[in-house]
Amino acid sequence: MTTPAPATLTETDLDAIAAFEGRVAIFVEEDGRLDPAGRRVNRLTRGALERMAASGRFTEMKQGDAAEIAYPSGMAAHGVVVVKLDRRAGDEAARKAGVALGRIKAGKPLLILGGNRKHAAGVLLGATLRAYAYSDQKTKAADPEAPITLMVGAPDDHRAAVDAVFALAEGVFFTRDLVSAPANVLTTTEFAARLEALRGIGLEVEVLDEDRLEELGMRLLLAVGQGSRAPTKMVVMRWMGGGDEAPVALVGKGVVFDTGGISIKPAAGMEDMTMDMGGAGVVSGVMKTLALRKAKANVVGLVGLVENMPDGNAIRPGDVVASMKGDTVEIINTDAEGRLVLADVMWYAQETYQPRAMVDLATLTGAIIIGLGHEKAGVFSNDDTLSGQVLKAAGAVGEGAWRMPLDPAYDAQLKSDIADMKNVGGRPAGSITAAQFLQRFVKDGTPWVHLDIAGVASTKSESAHAPKGASGWGVLTLDRLIRDGFEG
Protein backbone atom coordinates (compact mmCIF):
# COMPACT_ATOMS: atom_id res chain seq x y z
CA MET A 1 0.00 0.00 0.00
CA THR A 2 1.36 3.41 -0.98
CA THR A 3 1.28 5.95 1.82
CA PRO A 4 1.19 9.70 1.14
CA ALA A 5 4.13 11.74 2.35
CA PRO A 6 3.64 12.62 6.03
CA ALA A 7 2.71 16.27 6.35
CA THR A 8 3.40 18.57 9.30
CA LEU A 9 1.80 21.96 9.87
CA THR A 10 3.99 24.36 11.85
CA GLU A 11 4.17 28.05 12.67
CA THR A 12 6.61 30.18 10.70
CA ASP A 13 10.11 30.10 12.21
CA LEU A 14 12.50 32.13 10.10
CA ASP A 15 15.49 31.00 12.13
CA ALA A 16 14.87 27.35 11.23
CA ILE A 17 15.11 27.88 7.47
CA ALA A 18 18.90 27.92 7.18
CA ALA A 19 19.34 24.51 8.80
CA PHE A 20 16.61 22.64 6.89
CA GLU A 21 17.96 19.74 4.82
CA GLY A 22 16.04 18.87 1.69
CA ARG A 23 14.24 21.35 -0.53
CA VAL A 24 12.84 24.71 0.55
CA ALA A 25 9.95 26.16 -1.47
CA ILE A 26 9.42 29.90 -1.48
CA PHE A 27 6.70 31.89 -3.26
CA VAL A 28 7.53 34.96 -5.31
CA GLU A 29 4.98 37.44 -6.63
CA GLU A 30 4.66 38.26 -10.33
CA ASP A 31 6.41 41.59 -9.70
CA GLY A 32 9.23 39.94 -7.74
CA ARG A 33 8.02 40.94 -4.29
CA LEU A 34 9.14 38.72 -1.42
CA ASP A 35 7.37 38.00 1.86
CA PRO A 36 9.33 37.84 5.16
CA ALA A 37 10.37 34.21 4.55
CA GLY A 38 11.48 35.10 1.04
CA ARG A 39 13.54 38.01 2.33
CA ARG A 40 15.20 35.70 4.86
CA VAL A 41 16.06 33.17 2.11
CA ASN A 42 17.35 36.00 -0.05
CA ARG A 43 19.71 37.19 2.72
CA LEU A 44 20.90 33.65 3.39
CA THR A 45 21.68 33.12 -0.30
CA ARG A 46 23.34 36.53 -0.68
CA GLY A 47 20.70 37.88 -3.06
CA ALA A 48 20.24 34.78 -5.22
CA LEU A 49 16.47 34.93 -4.84
CA GLU A 50 16.30 38.55 -6.00
CA ARG A 51 18.53 37.78 -8.95
CA MET A 52 16.29 34.87 -9.89
CA ALA A 53 13.17 37.05 -9.63
CA ALA A 54 14.76 39.64 -11.92
CA SER A 55 15.85 37.12 -14.55
CA GLY A 56 14.31 36.35 -17.90
CA ARG A 57 13.76 32.80 -16.72
CA PHE A 58 11.39 34.04 -14.00
CA THR A 59 9.61 36.36 -16.43
CA GLU A 60 8.85 33.44 -18.74
CA MET A 61 7.41 31.35 -15.90
CA LYS A 62 3.62 31.11 -15.60
CA GLN A 63 1.56 31.18 -12.41
CA GLY A 64 2.24 27.96 -10.52
CA ASP A 65 5.52 27.21 -12.30
CA ALA A 66 8.60 26.37 -10.25
CA ALA A 67 12.36 26.49 -10.78
CA GLU A 68 15.15 25.27 -8.52
CA ILE A 69 18.31 26.95 -7.32
CA ALA A 70 20.51 23.94 -6.54
CA TYR A 71 22.73 23.77 -3.45
CA PRO A 72 22.28 27.40 -2.39
CA SER A 73 25.12 28.99 -0.43
CA GLY A 74 24.28 29.92 3.14
CA MET A 75 21.72 27.10 3.54
CA ALA A 76 21.84 23.38 4.32
CA ALA A 77 19.11 22.70 1.73
CA HIS A 78 19.68 20.66 -1.43
CA GLY A 79 17.82 23.37 -3.28
CA VAL A 80 15.59 26.42 -3.05
CA VAL A 81 12.52 26.02 -5.23
CA VAL A 82 11.23 29.34 -6.48
CA VAL A 83 7.48 29.23 -7.16
CA LYS A 84 5.81 31.99 -9.13
CA LEU A 85 2.51 32.44 -7.35
CA ASP A 86 0.69 35.65 -6.50
CA ARG A 87 -0.93 36.03 -3.12
CA ARG A 88 -4.36 36.29 -4.77
CA ALA A 89 -3.87 33.34 -7.10
CA GLY A 90 -6.75 30.87 -7.26
CA ASP A 91 -7.02 27.25 -6.22
CA GLU A 92 -6.02 25.93 -9.64
CA ALA A 93 -2.73 27.84 -9.64
CA ALA A 94 -2.07 26.73 -6.06
CA ARG A 95 -2.55 23.05 -6.93
CA LYS A 96 -0.41 23.50 -10.04
CA ALA A 97 2.36 24.97 -7.87
CA GLY A 98 2.05 22.02 -5.51
CA VAL A 99 2.26 19.53 -8.38
CA ALA A 100 5.44 21.24 -9.56
CA LEU A 101 6.87 20.90 -6.05
CA GLY A 102 5.87 17.25 -5.85
CA ARG A 103 7.66 16.61 -9.13
CA ILE A 104 10.84 18.39 -7.98
CA LYS A 105 10.72 16.89 -4.49
CA ALA A 106 12.33 13.65 -5.76
CA GLY A 107 12.23 11.83 -2.44
CA LYS A 108 13.76 14.61 -0.37
CA PRO A 109 12.09 16.37 2.58
CA LEU A 110 10.24 19.48 1.48
CA LEU A 111 9.67 22.68 3.45
CA ILE A 112 6.91 24.90 2.03
CA LEU A 113 7.15 28.47 3.31
CA GLY A 114 3.46 29.32 3.09
CA GLY A 115 3.52 32.50 5.15
CA ASN A 116 0.07 34.07 5.30
CA ARG A 117 -1.18 32.70 1.99
CA LYS A 118 -4.75 31.45 2.15
CA HIS A 119 -4.15 28.77 -0.49
CA ALA A 120 -1.24 27.05 1.29
CA ALA A 121 -3.27 23.85 1.79
CA GLY A 122 -3.97 23.71 -1.96
CA VAL A 123 -0.24 23.78 -2.60
CA LEU A 124 0.19 20.97 -0.08
CA LEU A 125 -2.52 18.92 -1.81
CA GLY A 126 -0.85 19.24 -5.21
CA ALA A 127 2.56 18.33 -3.81
CA THR A 128 1.21 15.32 -1.94
CA LEU A 129 -0.76 13.94 -4.89
CA ARG A 130 2.17 14.29 -7.32
CA ALA A 131 4.69 12.58 -5.02
CA TYR A 132 3.38 9.07 -5.79
CA ALA A 133 5.01 5.93 -7.13
CA TYR A 134 3.55 2.41 -7.22
CA SER A 135 6.17 -0.09 -6.12
CA ASP A 136 4.23 -2.95 -4.49
CA GLN A 137 5.43 -5.49 -7.07
CA LYS A 138 9.13 -4.65 -6.83
CA THR A 139 11.40 -6.90 -4.79
CA LYS A 140 13.21 -3.97 -3.20
CA ALA A 141 10.92 -2.16 -0.82
CA ALA A 142 10.49 1.50 -1.64
CA ASP A 143 11.80 4.03 0.85
CA PRO A 144 9.01 5.84 2.69
CA GLU A 145 8.18 9.14 1.04
CA ALA A 146 10.08 11.94 2.77
CA PRO A 147 7.94 14.34 4.80
CA ILE A 148 6.47 17.69 3.78
CA THR A 149 6.44 20.55 6.26
CA LEU A 150 4.01 23.41 5.68
CA MET A 151 5.16 26.50 7.59
CA VAL A 152 2.48 29.20 7.92
CA GLY A 153 1.82 32.26 10.04
CA ALA A 154 -1.34 30.96 11.73
CA PRO A 155 -1.44 27.14 11.74
CA ASP A 156 -4.89 26.93 13.35
CA ASP A 157 -6.39 28.74 10.35
CA HIS A 158 -5.14 25.97 8.06
CA ARG A 159 -5.63 22.89 10.23
CA ALA A 160 -9.03 21.82 8.90
CA ALA A 161 -7.89 22.26 5.29
CA VAL A 162 -4.70 20.25 5.94
CA ASP A 163 -6.75 17.46 7.54
CA ALA A 164 -8.89 17.40 4.39
CA VAL A 165 -5.73 17.11 2.29
CA PHE A 166 -4.75 14.01 4.26
CA ALA A 167 -8.18 12.39 3.72
CA LEU A 168 -8.15 13.19 0.00
CA ALA A 169 -4.61 11.93 -0.52
CA GLU A 170 -5.40 8.67 1.26
CA GLY A 171 -8.44 8.13 -0.97
CA VAL A 172 -6.60 9.01 -4.18
CA PHE A 173 -3.62 6.78 -3.32
CA PHE A 174 -5.96 3.91 -2.47
CA THR A 175 -7.59 4.27 -5.89
CA ARG A 176 -4.23 4.50 -7.69
CA ASP A 177 -2.93 1.39 -5.92
CA LEU A 178 -6.04 -0.58 -6.89
CA VAL A 179 -5.84 0.53 -10.53
CA SER A 180 -2.08 -0.15 -10.69
CA ALA A 181 -2.21 -3.66 -9.23
CA PRO A 182 -1.87 -6.54 -11.72
CA ALA A 183 -4.83 -8.84 -12.20
CA ASN A 184 -3.12 -11.89 -10.67
CA VAL A 185 -2.75 -9.86 -7.47
CA LEU A 186 -5.98 -7.87 -7.44
CA THR A 187 -8.40 -10.72 -8.01
CA THR A 188 -12.07 -10.24 -7.25
CA THR A 189 -11.48 -11.93 -3.89
CA GLU A 190 -8.51 -9.73 -3.02
CA PHE A 191 -10.37 -6.60 -4.11
CA ALA A 192 -13.27 -7.49 -1.82
CA ALA A 193 -10.85 -8.19 1.04
CA ARG A 194 -9.22 -4.77 0.67
CA LEU A 195 -12.64 -3.17 0.86
CA GLU A 196 -13.61 -5.24 3.89
CA ALA A 197 -10.51 -3.83 5.61
CA LEU A 198 -12.12 -0.37 5.39
CA ARG A 199 -14.36 -1.38 8.27
CA GLY A 200 -11.39 -0.33 10.39
CA ILE A 201 -12.03 3.35 9.56
CA GLY A 202 -15.77 3.18 10.18
CA LEU A 203 -17.30 2.06 6.87
CA GLU A 204 -20.01 -0.58 6.88
CA VAL A 205 -18.99 -3.17 4.28
CA GLU A 206 -21.09 -6.03 2.90
CA VAL A 207 -19.87 -8.60 0.37
CA LEU A 208 -22.48 -10.41 -1.72
CA ASP A 209 -21.30 -13.69 -3.26
CA GLU A 210 -22.54 -15.51 -6.35
CA ASP A 211 -25.29 -17.43 -4.56
CA ARG A 212 -26.77 -14.20 -3.22
CA LEU A 213 -26.41 -12.47 -6.60
CA GLU A 214 -28.28 -15.38 -8.21
CA GLU A 215 -31.06 -15.05 -5.62
CA LEU A 216 -31.34 -11.35 -6.46
CA GLY A 217 -31.56 -12.09 -10.18
CA MET A 218 -28.38 -10.20 -11.08
CA ARG A 219 -27.85 -12.35 -14.16
CA LEU A 220 -26.13 -9.71 -16.30
CA LEU A 221 -23.40 -9.27 -13.69
CA LEU A 222 -23.03 -13.03 -13.28
CA ALA A 223 -22.98 -13.61 -17.04
CA VAL A 224 -19.89 -11.44 -17.45
CA GLY A 225 -17.93 -13.56 -14.98
CA GLN A 226 -19.14 -17.04 -15.89
CA GLY A 227 -16.10 -17.70 -18.08
CA SER A 228 -13.66 -16.98 -15.24
CA ARG A 229 -12.49 -19.04 -12.30
CA ALA A 230 -12.58 -15.85 -10.20
CA PRO A 231 -15.86 -15.60 -8.29
CA THR A 232 -18.09 -12.66 -9.14
CA LYS A 233 -18.90 -10.42 -6.18
CA MET A 234 -20.67 -7.20 -5.33
CA VAL A 235 -19.38 -5.11 -2.46
CA VAL A 236 -21.52 -2.48 -0.76
CA MET A 237 -19.85 0.22 1.36
CA ARG A 238 -22.01 2.47 3.52
CA TRP A 239 -21.12 5.76 5.19
CA MET A 240 -24.09 7.12 7.12
CA GLY A 241 -23.01 10.45 8.55
CA GLY A 242 -25.99 12.53 7.48
CA GLY A 243 -28.96 11.62 9.64
CA ASP A 244 -32.15 10.43 7.99
CA GLU A 245 -31.48 11.72 4.47
CA ALA A 246 -31.72 9.30 1.56
CA PRO A 247 -28.18 8.42 0.47
CA VAL A 248 -26.23 9.31 -2.63
CA ALA A 249 -25.33 6.12 -4.51
CA LEU A 250 -21.93 5.78 -6.18
CA VAL A 251 -21.66 2.78 -8.51
CA GLY A 252 -18.41 1.48 -9.99
CA LYS A 253 -17.49 -1.00 -12.72
CA GLY A 254 -14.96 -3.43 -11.26
CA VAL A 255 -13.76 -5.67 -14.11
CA VAL A 256 -10.41 -6.73 -12.66
CA PHE A 257 -9.26 -7.94 -16.06
CA ASP A 258 -10.96 -7.71 -19.43
CA THR A 259 -9.89 -9.99 -22.28
CA GLY A 260 -13.06 -9.10 -24.14
CA GLY A 261 -14.37 -12.61 -23.55
CA ILE A 262 -15.31 -14.54 -26.68
CA SER A 263 -15.16 -11.21 -28.57
CA ILE A 264 -11.50 -11.22 -27.61
CA LYS A 265 -9.39 -8.08 -27.77
CA PRO A 266 -6.18 -7.81 -29.84
CA ALA A 267 -3.08 -8.96 -27.96
CA ALA A 268 -1.30 -5.62 -28.31
CA GLY A 269 -2.13 -3.48 -25.33
CA MET A 270 -4.29 -6.04 -23.55
CA GLU A 271 -2.02 -5.74 -20.49
CA ASP A 272 -3.61 -2.33 -19.90
CA MET A 273 -6.90 -4.02 -19.10
CA THR A 274 -5.80 -4.44 -15.50
CA MET A 275 -7.21 -0.90 -15.14
CA ASP A 276 -10.72 -1.86 -16.27
CA MET A 277 -11.80 -1.79 -12.63
CA GLY A 278 -11.04 1.95 -12.52
CA GLY A 279 -14.62 2.96 -11.77
CA ALA A 280 -14.77 0.64 -8.77
CA GLY A 281 -11.37 1.94 -7.70
CA VAL A 282 -12.64 5.53 -7.67
CA VAL A 283 -15.77 4.61 -5.72
CA SER A 284 -13.58 2.81 -3.17
CA GLY A 285 -11.23 5.79 -2.84
CA VAL A 286 -14.10 8.22 -2.37
CA MET A 287 -15.66 6.07 0.33
CA LYS A 288 -12.32 5.93 2.14
CA THR A 289 -11.98 9.71 1.97
CA LEU A 290 -15.52 10.29 3.25
CA ALA A 291 -14.92 8.00 6.21
CA LEU A 292 -11.56 9.55 7.07
CA ARG A 293 -12.96 13.08 7.08
CA LYS A 294 -16.18 12.01 8.83
CA ALA A 295 -18.38 13.46 6.12
CA LYS A 296 -21.81 14.65 7.26
CA ALA A 297 -23.59 12.86 4.45
CA ASN A 298 -25.14 9.51 3.67
CA VAL A 299 -23.34 7.81 0.81
CA VAL A 300 -23.47 4.22 -0.44
CA GLY A 301 -20.72 2.90 -2.68
CA LEU A 302 -21.48 -0.23 -4.70
CA VAL A 303 -18.99 -2.06 -6.92
CA GLY A 304 -19.48 -5.07 -9.15
CA LEU A 305 -16.30 -7.17 -9.13
CA VAL A 306 -15.85 -9.61 -12.00
CA GLU A 307 -13.34 -10.94 -14.52
CA ASN A 308 -14.18 -11.24 -18.23
CA MET A 309 -12.45 -14.32 -19.68
CA PRO A 310 -12.95 -16.62 -22.72
CA ASP A 311 -13.83 -20.11 -21.58
CA GLY A 312 -16.09 -23.00 -22.46
CA ASN A 313 -18.61 -21.55 -20.04
CA ALA A 314 -18.29 -17.91 -21.18
CA ILE A 315 -21.23 -15.99 -22.60
CA ARG A 316 -21.35 -16.01 -26.39
CA PRO A 317 -22.31 -13.37 -28.93
CA GLY A 318 -26.00 -13.96 -29.56
CA ASP A 319 -26.86 -15.12 -26.04
CA VAL A 320 -29.87 -13.49 -24.36
CA VAL A 321 -29.68 -12.75 -20.64
CA ALA A 322 -32.32 -11.32 -18.30
CA SER A 323 -31.36 -8.44 -16.01
CA MET A 324 -32.30 -7.92 -12.37
CA LYS A 325 -34.80 -5.36 -13.64
CA GLY A 326 -36.39 -8.06 -15.79
CA ASP A 327 -35.47 -6.70 -19.23
CA THR A 328 -33.72 -9.07 -21.59
CA VAL A 329 -30.46 -8.21 -23.33
CA GLU A 330 -29.08 -9.74 -26.51
CA ILE A 331 -25.30 -9.95 -26.11
CA ILE A 332 -23.89 -8.87 -29.45
CA ASN A 333 -20.37 -8.18 -28.21
CA THR A 334 -18.99 -9.76 -25.05
CA ASP A 335 -16.37 -6.99 -24.89
CA ALA A 336 -19.17 -4.54 -24.06
CA GLU A 337 -19.41 -6.09 -20.61
CA GLY A 338 -19.07 -3.05 -18.36
CA ARG A 339 -22.58 -1.82 -19.08
CA LEU A 340 -23.91 -5.26 -18.10
CA VAL A 341 -22.11 -5.03 -14.76
CA LEU A 342 -23.39 -1.52 -14.11
CA ALA A 343 -26.98 -2.24 -15.16
CA ASP A 344 -27.58 -4.80 -12.42
CA VAL A 345 -25.64 -2.95 -9.73
CA MET A 346 -27.43 0.33 -10.51
CA TRP A 347 -30.80 -1.41 -10.33
CA TYR A 348 -29.89 -3.01 -7.00
CA ALA A 349 -28.79 0.38 -5.65
CA GLN A 350 -32.13 1.93 -6.51
CA GLU A 351 -34.24 -0.98 -5.31
CA THR A 352 -32.40 -1.21 -2.00
CA TYR A 353 -31.54 2.40 -1.10
CA GLN A 354 -33.88 4.69 -3.09
CA PRO A 355 -31.00 7.15 -3.51
CA ARG A 356 -31.53 10.89 -3.82
CA ALA A 357 -28.92 10.86 -6.60
CA MET A 358 -26.86 8.22 -8.36
CA VAL A 359 -23.47 8.52 -10.07
CA ASP A 360 -21.81 5.64 -11.89
CA LEU A 361 -18.19 5.52 -13.05
CA ALA A 362 -16.66 3.18 -15.57
CA THR A 363 -13.80 2.75 -17.98
CA LEU A 364 -16.59 2.03 -20.38
CA THR A 365 -15.76 2.87 -24.00
CA GLY A 366 -12.81 3.49 -26.26
CA ALA A 367 -15.13 5.85 -28.12
CA ILE A 368 -14.91 8.43 -25.34
CA ILE A 369 -11.12 8.55 -25.83
CA ILE A 370 -11.64 9.27 -29.53
CA GLY A 371 -14.00 12.09 -28.59
CA LEU A 372 -12.26 13.64 -25.58
CA GLY A 373 -8.76 12.18 -25.50
CA HIS A 374 -7.09 11.78 -22.13
CA GLU A 375 -7.93 15.25 -20.81
CA LYS A 376 -11.59 14.94 -19.87
CA ALA A 377 -14.09 12.36 -18.68
CA GLY A 378 -17.41 12.10 -20.48
CA VAL A 379 -20.44 13.23 -18.46
CA PHE A 380 -23.90 11.91 -19.36
CA SER A 381 -26.96 12.76 -17.31
CA ASN A 382 -30.75 12.78 -17.14
CA ASP A 383 -30.69 15.76 -14.75
CA ASP A 384 -29.32 19.21 -15.51
CA THR A 385 -28.93 20.15 -11.86
CA LEU A 386 -26.91 17.08 -10.90
CA SER A 387 -24.77 17.21 -14.04
CA GLY A 388 -24.10 20.89 -13.34
CA GLN A 389 -23.02 20.03 -9.81
CA VAL A 390 -20.65 17.35 -11.10
CA LEU A 391 -19.13 19.65 -13.72
CA LYS A 392 -18.74 22.46 -11.18
CA ALA A 393 -17.05 20.09 -8.72
CA ALA A 394 -14.69 18.77 -11.40
CA GLY A 395 -13.77 22.30 -12.43
CA ALA A 396 -13.16 23.36 -8.85
CA VAL A 397 -10.66 20.56 -8.22
CA GLY A 398 -8.95 20.68 -11.61
CA GLU A 399 -10.24 17.37 -13.02
CA GLY A 400 -11.35 17.62 -16.64
CA ALA A 401 -14.94 16.71 -17.53
CA TRP A 402 -17.25 17.46 -20.45
CA ARG A 403 -20.97 16.91 -20.83
CA MET A 404 -22.05 14.63 -23.67
CA PRO A 405 -25.56 14.24 -25.12
CA LEU A 406 -28.31 11.77 -24.38
CA ASP A 407 -31.20 11.55 -26.82
CA PRO A 408 -33.91 8.99 -27.61
CA ALA A 409 -32.84 9.15 -31.26
CA TYR A 410 -29.86 6.95 -30.39
CA ASP A 411 -32.10 4.20 -28.96
CA ALA A 412 -32.80 2.82 -32.42
CA GLN A 413 -29.21 1.54 -32.53
CA LEU A 414 -29.94 -0.68 -29.50
CA LYS A 415 -33.06 -2.31 -30.94
CA SER A 416 -32.96 -6.13 -30.93
CA ASP A 417 -35.08 -8.46 -33.02
CA ILE A 418 -35.16 -11.16 -30.34
CA ALA A 419 -34.78 -9.37 -26.99
CA ASP A 420 -35.70 -6.08 -25.33
CA MET A 421 -32.38 -4.51 -26.34
CA LYS A 422 -28.88 -5.20 -27.62
CA ASN A 423 -25.82 -4.43 -25.54
CA VAL A 424 -24.12 -2.45 -28.32
CA GLY A 425 -25.28 -0.11 -31.05
CA GLY A 426 -22.37 -0.25 -33.46
CA ARG A 427 -19.43 2.13 -33.92
CA PRO A 428 -21.27 5.42 -34.44
CA ALA A 429 -21.68 7.37 -31.17
CA GLY A 430 -20.38 4.40 -29.19
CA SER A 431 -20.05 6.17 -25.86
CA ILE A 432 -23.51 7.73 -26.25
CA THR A 433 -25.27 4.45 -27.03
CA ALA A 434 -23.53 2.90 -24.02
CA ALA A 435 -24.98 5.66 -21.84
CA GLN A 436 -28.39 5.22 -23.49
CA PHE A 437 -28.19 1.54 -22.55
CA LEU A 438 -27.45 2.42 -18.92
CA GLN A 439 -30.26 4.97 -18.79
CA ARG A 440 -32.74 2.13 -19.29
CA PHE A 441 -31.76 0.94 -15.82
CA VAL A 442 -32.37 4.32 -14.15
CA LYS A 443 -35.76 4.67 -12.52
CA ASP A 444 -37.98 7.64 -13.29
CA GLY A 445 -37.28 10.38 -10.77
CA THR A 446 -33.73 9.29 -9.95
CA PRO A 447 -31.20 12.03 -10.80
CA TRP A 448 -28.31 10.21 -12.46
CA VAL A 449 -24.89 10.93 -13.91
CA HIS A 450 -22.76 8.46 -15.85
CA LEU A 451 -19.03 9.20 -15.96
CA ASP A 452 -17.07 7.45 -18.71
CA ILE A 453 -13.50 7.61 -17.39
CA ALA A 454 -11.82 5.35 -19.96
CA GLY A 455 -9.50 8.15 -21.08
CA VAL A 456 -8.56 9.56 -17.69
CA ALA A 457 -8.29 6.63 -15.26
CA SER A 458 -4.76 5.71 -16.37
CA THR A 459 -2.56 7.63 -18.79
CA LYS A 460 0.73 7.10 -20.62
CA SER A 461 2.04 10.52 -19.57
CA GLU A 462 1.61 12.52 -16.41
CA SER A 463 -1.83 13.98 -15.77
CA ALA A 464 -2.98 17.02 -13.81
CA HIS A 465 -2.06 15.69 -10.35
CA ALA A 466 -0.23 12.43 -11.01
CA PRO A 467 2.78 10.87 -12.71
CA LYS A 468 2.02 8.58 -15.65
CA GLY A 469 -0.14 5.61 -14.81
CA ALA A 470 -3.15 5.50 -12.52
CA SER A 471 -4.45 9.01 -11.91
CA GLY A 472 -7.15 8.55 -9.29
CA TRP A 473 -9.38 10.83 -11.40
CA GLY A 474 -12.76 11.26 -9.75
CA VAL A 475 -11.93 11.01 -6.06
CA LEU A 476 -11.45 14.78 -5.77
CA THR A 477 -14.50 15.50 -7.92
CA LEU A 478 -16.93 13.21 -6.10
CA ASP A 479 -15.68 14.25 -2.67
CA ARG A 480 -16.26 17.89 -3.69
CA LEU A 481 -19.69 16.98 -5.08
CA ILE A 482 -20.67 15.43 -1.75
CA ARG A 483 -19.14 18.28 0.27
CA ASP A 484 -20.84 21.06 -1.70
CA GLY A 485 -24.13 19.45 -2.60
CA PHE A 486 -25.11 16.80 -0.08
CA GLU A 487 -23.60 17.51 3.34
CA GLY A 488 -25.83 18.94 6.03
Image (spheres, rainbow, N blue to C red):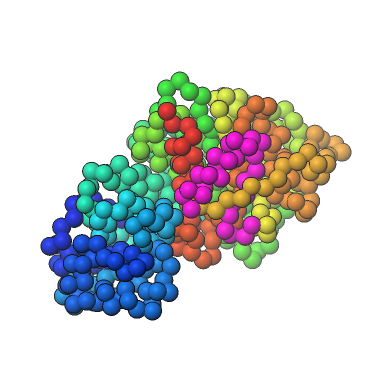
Q: Is residue 391 magenta?
A: yes
**Residue located farthest toward the left when viewing the structure as drawn:** 15
Q: Residue sitting at 17 percent across and 72 percent down?
A: 43
Q: Residue sitting at 55 percent across and 27 percent down?
A: 356
Examine the rendering and report whether any part of residue 458 can be seen. Answer: yes
Question: How many marks do you count on the picture?
Answer: 0
Q: Quadrant of the C terminus?
A: top left
Q: Residue sitting at 48 percent across and 59 percent down?
A: 464
Examine the rendering and report whether any part of residue 107 can be seen. Answer: no
**In x, y percent, where is residue 412?**
83, 41
In the picture, residue 223 is in which quadrant? Answer: top right
- In depth, the one of 311 and 384 nearer the eye is 384
Q: Describe residue 428's horizontal placement relative to residue 235 as left or right.
A: right
- In depth, the one of 97 and 241 nearer the eye is 97
Q: Describe residue 65's horizontal placement relative to residue 370 as left or right.
A: left
**Residue located farthest toward the right when viewing the structure as drawn:** 417
- In depth, the one of 247 and 255 nearer the eye is 247
- Which segment is the magenta one? 372-398
**In x, y percent, where is residue 190?**
46, 45
Q: Residue sitting at 79 percent across and 51 percent down?
A: 426
- In depth, the one of 77 and 249 nearer the eye is 77
Q: Is residue 59 magenta?
A: no
**In x, y percent, where is residue 80?**
26, 70
* Image height of 167 relative to 471, above or below: above
**In x, y percent, where is residue 169?**
38, 49
* Image height of 272 relative to 236, above or below: below
